[in-house]
Amino acid sequence: MSTAAQKLSDLERGLMELVYQSRLSEIKIKELAEEMNDFKDEMKEFKEEMRQSKRDMDKKWGDLARKMGTLIEDIFIPSFDLAVEKYFHLTPSDVMPRRKIRKNGDTLEVDILAYAGEMAFVVEVKASPNRLEYVHDFIAKLKTLPDFLPEIQKYQTVPIYAALDMEDKTIALLTRNKIYAMVVRGDILELVNFRELERKND
């Protein structure tokens, strides 16, 4: 083969290789574009799932808030007088559900506030009582209560943490902090650590 023919053959092979690489690049670019489109679709689906998840969570919080209202007003309030009479031999003169107190731009809410004789009953009602941070939040609330409600200092404060039921570890934590644990037994409200706290107070 002549030198000129060899050069032409090499050139043809080079052009063919260039065409092949160009075509390969086109294929890869097309595949990448398709993958990007698929990724965009997946991101749209993910965003919609996140929006739906947020809507579901908002609904659950709304349901929980309504459940809390039901617990306080339908279960604890109607039987609260009887529980105070049973354990403390007093009849409440005033029982206030969902007492909200505002001071200097801050707000403090007490689920049930009741006065009987020289005692002030401060009740925290929880739908999920076994989250221990809720107990610590209640302890902190009790410390700030006199700042929002100075007149309560004239009374002996009786703190009560209430729920439909609660675990032993929650009751033990409440007892260590001198807080009564109130649960529902049938249609009766019981202070399940009453005797222990009474012994501590003797």
Image (cartoon, rainbow, N blue to C red):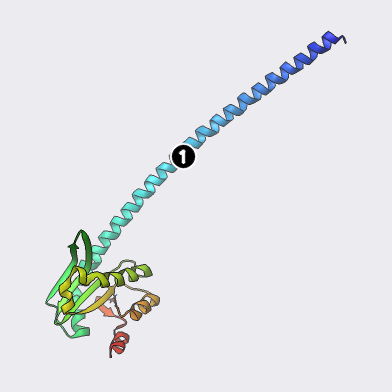
Q: Residue 37, percent across and down?
A: 50, 32
Closer to the camera, 72 or 135? 135
Quarter residue 34 falls in: top right
Q: Is residue 163 visible?
A: no
Q: Residue 39, percent across and down?
A: 50, 37
Left or right of 69 on screen, residue 25: right
Compared to residue 32, the image places residue 141 above or below, namely below
Q: Residue 172, percent across and down?
A: 37, 79
Q: Quadrant of the N terminus?
A: top right
Give neighbour class at mark 1: few <14, some 14-19, many 20+ (Cα, 10 Å): few
Q: What residue is shown at x 19% (from left), y 72% (from top)?
A: 113
Closer to the camera, 137 or 106? 106
Left or right of 101 on screen, residue 41: right
Q: What residue is shown at x 15% (from left), y 74% (from top)?
A: 151
Tally of numbered discs: 1
For this orientation, the residue located farthest to the bottom is 202
Q: What residue is shown at x 29% (from left), y 74% (from top)?
A: 161
Quarter residue 87 falls in: bottom left
Q: Residue 18, percent across and down?
A: 69, 19
For this orientation, the residue located farthest to the right is 1
Compared to residue 167, the image places residue 104 above or below, namely above
Closer to the camera, 29 or 64? 29
Q: Quadrant of the C terminus?
A: bottom left
Q: Is residue 152 visible?
A: yes
Local secondary structure at mark 1: helix
For this orientation, the residue located farthest to the left is 93
Say what amino acid the circle numbered 1 marks. Met
Q: Which residue is mark 1?
A: 43
Compared to residue 80, the image places residue 39 above or below, namely above
